[in-house]
Image: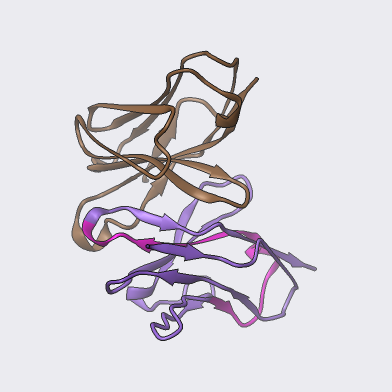
Chain colours: A brown, B purple
Amino acid sequence: DVKVTQSSRYLVKRTGEKVFLECVQDMDHENMFWYRQDPGLGLRLIYFSYDVKMKEKGDIPEGYSVSREKKERFSLILESASTNQTSMYLCASSSRIRDTQETQYFGPGTRLLVL
Amino acid sequence: AQRVTQPEKLLSVFKGAPVELKCNYSYSGSPELFWYVQYSRQRLQLLLRHISRESIKGFTADLNKGETSFHLKKPFAQEEDSAMYYCALSQGNTGKLIFGQGTTLQVKP
């Protein structure tokens, strides 16, 4: 069974804290993604990684960074959390095989509240 | 610019009624489009892709290049269809998707 896991379902942090969100997939997928999910705005891509140590900015990278040291793990880092980063964060992965790479497998999400 | 628009935030229908969730896109090349669904307390998952022309859970979607649309349809809605639906556009060979704003479908008994 395909599995993408995220380290926390709920997180409460204070403004200015450094926040780490972890995502692990067990499907040997090359591609991994971090999205924000906000009502009325849909899913917006924060960062994308297509291989170990490779990363690419998405549509809203400001205030975030990522790390991909191992193929199965993709971390999202909020260097200094702000209240406007309160959101649901979704991790996803996909294979780079041509006809299947748009099938993204999602984690359960992390709901982050920044006070 | 590449864009996906879902004009309805909420669509509410009665059980047994037909459903059409609208999706319009803007893309200069040959588009590949998808519908993803998120049921309550479940993770987001692929519902269907236009290229396979399949029907999943009674839903179909036809790509209309003239109208740049990919509307999701079902002739008779069921209560278990209640969920958030996202239309998505592939960004070429990158593996990346552009998602629409999402439409909540509420099927009332």
Residue A59 belongs to magenta span: no
Q: Nearer the viewer, residue A52 or B76?
A: A52
Q: Residue furthest bottom?
A: B66
Q: Residue visible at 46% across and 54% down? A: B45
The outermost residue toward the right is B109
Is residue A37 positioned above or below A75 on the image? below
Image coordinates for residue B55, horizontal then vertical, percent: 46, 76
The segment highlighted magenta reads B72-93
Kindly give the residue lying farthest to the front in the view shown: B1
User: With respect to residue B26, does A95 lie above or below?
Assistant: above
Please name whichever residue, B48 or A27, is drawn nearer the observer in this view of the structure. Answer: B48
Q: Is residue B73 magenta?
A: yes
Q: Position of residue A86 (x, y in %)?
A: 59, 30
Please name the residue shown 28% across and 74% down the image. B30
Q: Position of residue B95 (x, y in %)?
A: 27, 54
Q: Position of residue B32 (x, y in %)?
A: 33, 69
Quarter-wise, where is residue B12 in the image? Answer: bottom right
Task: Say which residue appears at 32% left-offset and 71% top-offset.
Answer: B31
For the C terminus of chain A, give its image quadrant. Answer: top right
Q: Is residue B102 left or right of residue A107?
A: right
Looking at the image, which is closer to me, B58 or A112?
Answer: A112
Left or right of B106 on screen, residue A94: left
- Of the pair B85 and A42, the residue shown nearer to us: A42
- B84 versus A59 height, above or below: below
